[in-house]
Image (tube, grey):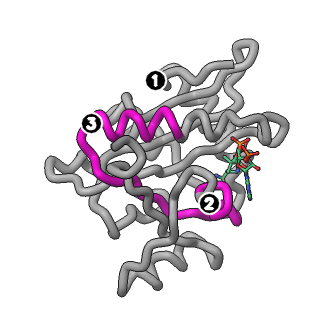
Amino acid sequence: MPWRPMTAQDLAQVQILADTIHLDHPEDARVFEERQRLYPQGCLVLEEGGRIVGYALTHPWHFGSPPALNSLLGEIPSKATTYYVHDVALLPETRGKGYAVQAGERLARHAHDAGFGNMSLVAVNNSQAFWERLDFRAADVPGLEAKLLTYGPDAVLMMRNLAQAYS
Ligand SMILES: CC(C)(COP(=O)(O)OP(=O)(O)OC[C@H]1O[C@@H](n2cnc3c(N)ncnc32)[C@H](O)[C@@H]1OP(=O)(O)O)[C@@H](O)C(=O)NCCC(=O)NCCS
């Protein structure tokens, strides 16, 4: 069951998945549509028998300044300082089989090859330990506490150094 690039035709199914998985972090269709349109090379789906069972949304961004949830990016910054993971999500029955790690490694390779020295994300839903498995570590950015709380009480900014990973 390989990951493949997300297309515009996948967006309706991706939205259903997101609404099912992220009950506490709802996002509008325009958010998914914009990310897929602005940075298709960072958007993946996991498909099983014609049904999408997982997705990943990622894009270049500014380190230490995660986009607010349910907000549009406007454009991909020309001077991006991080490769940002907006979301990786799988249906519950698809978890625990290594697919999310596969997506993470594929995206890390892409980010490295695109010239990024780091990846970052905001871990939610108690996913911090999962991201640590992918070599992300909690990162302290002073002044970010209030913004992180808008993601939820357990939100943690995390960063992975890519230079170390592929040197
Ligand atoms: C986070 C998520 C994508 C992980 O998916 P998954 O299918 O469990 O991940 P994998 O099977 O690829 O996990 C691989 C490894 O991570 C570990 N792992 C996964 N979730 C973990 C957790 N919450 N705590 C600790 N370890 C975890 C597994 O034990 C496994 O380790 P191993 O290879 O050494 O045995 C999935 O739980 C999910 O979709 N959650 C809901 C959406 C979400 O919150 N996404 C994160 C947003 S920041």
Q: Looking at the picture, does residue 16 appear above or below residue 121? A: above
Marks 2 & 3, CB-CB < 8 Å contact: no
Residue type, numbered disc 1? Ala
Tell me where residue 49 sits by quadrant.
Answer: top right
Which mark is first along the chain, 3 or 1?
A: 1
Does dot 1 land on a helix, a strand or a loop?
Answer: helix
Q: Which of 34 and 116 lies nearest the eye of the viewer? A: 116
Please report the bounds of the magenta region as a residue range: 105-131
Q: Looking at the picture, does residue 8 appear above or below residue 106? A: above
Find out if the beta carbon at label 1 lies less than 8 Å from the nearest ligand 1 atom.
Answer: no
**Can residue 34 be seen in this snapshot?**
yes
Q: Which of 140 and 93 lies nearest the eye of the viewer? A: 140
In the image, taking residue 102 as reference, residue 79 lies left or right, namely left
Density class for disc 3 (Cα within 10 Å; few <14, some 14-19, many ≥20) is few
* Residue 126 magenta-highlighted: yes
Whole-angstrom CA distance, mark 2 to mark 3, is 29 Å
Which mark is first along the chain, 3 or 2?
A: 2
Residue 80 point in image, percent of width and height: 22, 53
Instruction: Find disc 3 in the rendering and name its residue.
Output: 114
Residue type, numbered disc 3? Ala
Instruction: Find disc 1 in the rendering and name its residue.
Output: 8
Instruction: Find disc 2 in the rendering and name its residue.
Output: 25
Which image quadrant: the N terminus?
top right
Q: Looking at the picture, does residue 144 appear above or below residue 159? A: below
Which image quadrant: the C terminus?
top left
Does dot 2 land on a helix, a strand or a loop?
Answer: loop
Residue extending farthest right:
93
* Residue 73 magenta-highlighted: no
Residue type, numbered disc 2? His
Find out if the beta carbon at label 2 lies less than 8 Å from the nearest ligand 1 atom.
Answer: no
Does dot 3 land on a helix, a strand or a loop?
Answer: loop
